[in-house]
Amino acid sequence: MTGPSTRLKLRVVPGVGRPGIVGRHGDAWKVRVSAAPERGKANEALLVELASVLDLSRRDVELVAGHSSRDKVALVRELPKGEIEARLESAAGR
């Protein structure tokens, strides 16, 4: 790790038609993914979506908790928390 890292709380809704960042869900970010919650497909789709929205490489986003739950924690590398929050808010259309 060369830059900052941040743990990000997420609430994931799998199997939807329109994936993307929805907005806040309490202290977490609500994210929709089109992949089904089976064999890690929704988890991988979540990480790809986050990396894309945050303009990071996929390797800079890692799932660290909640592998089989809708409530997850991702580790985001290379961006400070404020920048992550700003990019997620922008993606949610706020």
Image: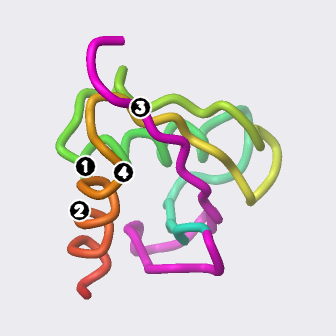
Q: Residue at x 71, y 50 (%)?
A: 37
Q: Are marks 2 and 1 in contact (CB under 8 Å)?
A: yes
* Distance (Cα) linking label 4 and label 1: 11 Å
Task: Give coordinates of residue 49: x percent, y percent.
Answer: 36, 50
Circle 3 sits on which residue? Answer: 5
Say few, some or many: other residues with alpha carbon within 10 Å of mark 4 (under 14 / 14 to 19 / 20 or more). some
Residue 87's tag is 2
Q: Is residue 4 above or below residue 24?
A: above
Q: Is residue 86 above or below residue 7?
A: below
Please tell me in which quadrant of the rendered image residue 43 appears: top right
Q: Are marks 3 and 1 in contact (CB under 8 Å)?
A: no
On the picture, is 19 further left or further right than 32? left
Tell me residue 51's x, y (percent).
Answer: 31, 41
Q: Earlier in the sequence, mark 2 or mark 1?
A: 1
The type of residue carrying mark 2 is: Arg
Q: Which residue is tagged 1?
A: 54
**Mark 3: secondary structure:** strand
- Amino acid under disc 4: Lys
Bounds of the magenta segment: 1-27
Splitting the image into 4 quarters, where does residue 82 fall?
bottom left
- Mark 3 and mark 1: Cα distance apart in space: 13 Å
Residue 59: percent from the left, percent from the top? 36, 20
Q: Nearer the viewer, residue 28 or 47?
A: 28
Of tags 4 and 2, the one toward the viewer is 4
Disc 2, disc 3: CB below 8 Å?
no
